[in-house]
Amino acid sequence: MGFSWLASHSVNFVIAHDGFTLYDLVSYNFKHNDANGEGGNDGSNDNLSWNCGYEGETNDIFIKALRSRQMKNFHLALMISLGTPMMLMGDEYAHTRYGNNNSYGHDTALNHFQWGLLEERRSNHFRFFKEVIKFRQTSHVFSRDTFLNENDVTWHEDNWDNYDSKFLAFTFHDISGGDIYLAFNAHDYFIKVSIPSPPPNRRWFRVVDTNLESPDDFVRGGVPGIGSNYNVAPYSSILLEAKK
């Protein structure tokens, strides 16, 4: 009997238990492991991270807003990917280990779940993470367990050989007409994109725009009135849903 690979056999993740938390991924360029007592020699030196312009904690509102968008962008990308998503406990409230990427030996707040921060961020960061998970669970497009074929997705980015391009847009097609359009803009400037026509007898509703403040960053029923163009903000992502 042959074995058939399913999408759920693939495990997708942005970060794992080793390395930076999601918050630290957007807040630190370098590991800060002095507290581990190994002279900073432990832990990976290659974290594939970006601190958004400042190393570590800051009161700069613009950097903090950018970090918030980046975490939302990563979470959205993870939750719309076919397969089994893996999150690190604490990322739902933006847990930090202050740049320590090898904290296993600490029985402290570095590794303890911070219930107070969860409550503090329940109406913004946590809300976005929770709602995107619910959307994944209830959307027919993301409930499939077979890999995509050429009829299941339309790519609106064909500049694959341009290594300077940091924009990606595509549409997931649904047999019932509930298509999903997604765009990710990693450039530091706005990109005005042409929105494809929705399926017959449907309209586009904006569910996600990570550039907007909570609760507008995720609107469960979607916001109507999406035209033929959309200005995707720097370091942000959008999700549109085709509905009647």
Image: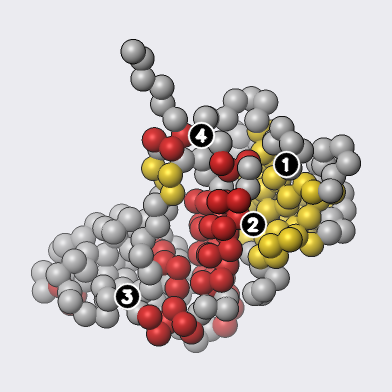
The residue that label 2 is drawn on is: 237
Q: In the image, which is nearer the foreground, mark 3 or mark 4?
A: 4
Reading the chain from its start, which is encountered first: label 2 or label 4? 4
Residue type at tag 4: Asp
In this view, the residue farthest toward the left is 38
Reading the chain from its start, which is encountered first: label 3 or label 4? 3
The residue under the point 44% across, 63% down is 50
The alpha-carbon separation of the residues under discs 4 and 1 comes to 17 Å
Q: Secondary structure at mark 2?
A: strand
- Label 3 environment density (alpha carbons within 10 Å; few <14, some 14–19, many ≥20): some
Q: In the image, which is nearer the foreground, mark 1 or mark 2?
A: 1
The residue under the point 46% across, 40% down is 83
The alpha-carbon separation of the residues under discs 1 and 2 comes to 17 Å
The residue that label 1 is drawn on is: 179
Residue type at tag 2: Ser
Q: In the image, which is nearer the foreground, mark 3 or mark 2?
A: 3
Task: Find residue 195 and report its horizontal and vertical position in percent.
Answer: 80, 46
Query: How many numbered dots are placed on residues in this image?
Result: 4
The alpha-carbon separation of the residues under discs 3 and 2 comes to 28 Å
- Label 2 environment density (alpha carbons within 10 Å; few <14, some 14–19, many ≥20): many
